Image (tube, helix red, strand yellow):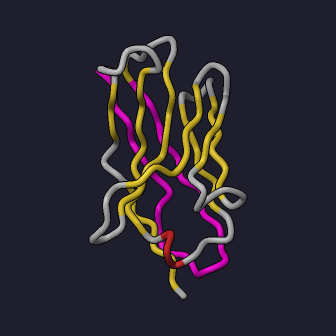
Amino acid sequence: QVQLVESGGGLVQAGGSLTLSCAVSGRTLSRYAMGWFRQAPGKEREFVARITWSGGTTSYADSVKGRFTISRDNAKNAVYLQMNSLKPEDTAVYYCEARGLVNRDFDYWGQGTQVTVSS
């Protein structure tokens, strides 16, 4: 029904920047949100950022506020995560999510992309 494909992960030194992309394909709802989550080794998956597709309302985890920026490109059906001032603790697999704002049964995930921040 819906496919999400992340890209842009890689290795970067602390203090550097990296931009992740998530391409959305398939049939989506009229009202939904796109978000980024991450999971570090030995830790639970945690929320990073989210943006509503139509209104562009954003929300961020406290740990990334001021450093990360989520955005969307409606024409390209894509969502992005601009990550600045990266820290070693940002190292994780980053996942893209599509979730319905009204229909909670609409919930899809990408396969993830690895982000590694070295000291």
Between 10 and 58, the residue placed more toward the observer is: 58
Between 20 and 76, the residue placed more toward the observer is: 20
Residue positioned 63% across, 31% down in the render:
73
Point out the image quarter for the N terminus. Answer: top left
Q: Position of residue 39 (x, y in %)?
A: 36, 60
Residue 75 position (above or below residue 64): above
**Left or right of residue 87, residue 101 in this image:** left
**Left or right of residue 96, residue 41 in this image:** left
Residue 86 position (above or below residue 58): below
Q: Position of residue 105 (x, y in %)?
A: 29, 20
Image quarter of residue 26: top left
Residue 103 position (above or below residue 84): above
> Which stretch did the figure color magenta?
1-25
Q: Position of residue 49 (x, y in %)?
A: 55, 46
Give the main secondary structure, helix, strand or loop, of the magenta stretch: strand
Residue positioned 51% across, 83% down in the render:
118
The single residue placed furthest to the right in the displayed view is 66
Residue positioned 58% across, 75% down in the render:
87
Residue 109 located within the stretch drawn in magenta: no
Q: Position of residue 97 (x, y in %)?
A: 41, 38
Point out the image quarter for the C terminus. Answer: bottom right
Residue positioned 36% across, 67% down in the render:
40
The single residue placed furthest to the top in the displayed view is 30
Between 49 and 17, the residue placed more toward the observer is: 49
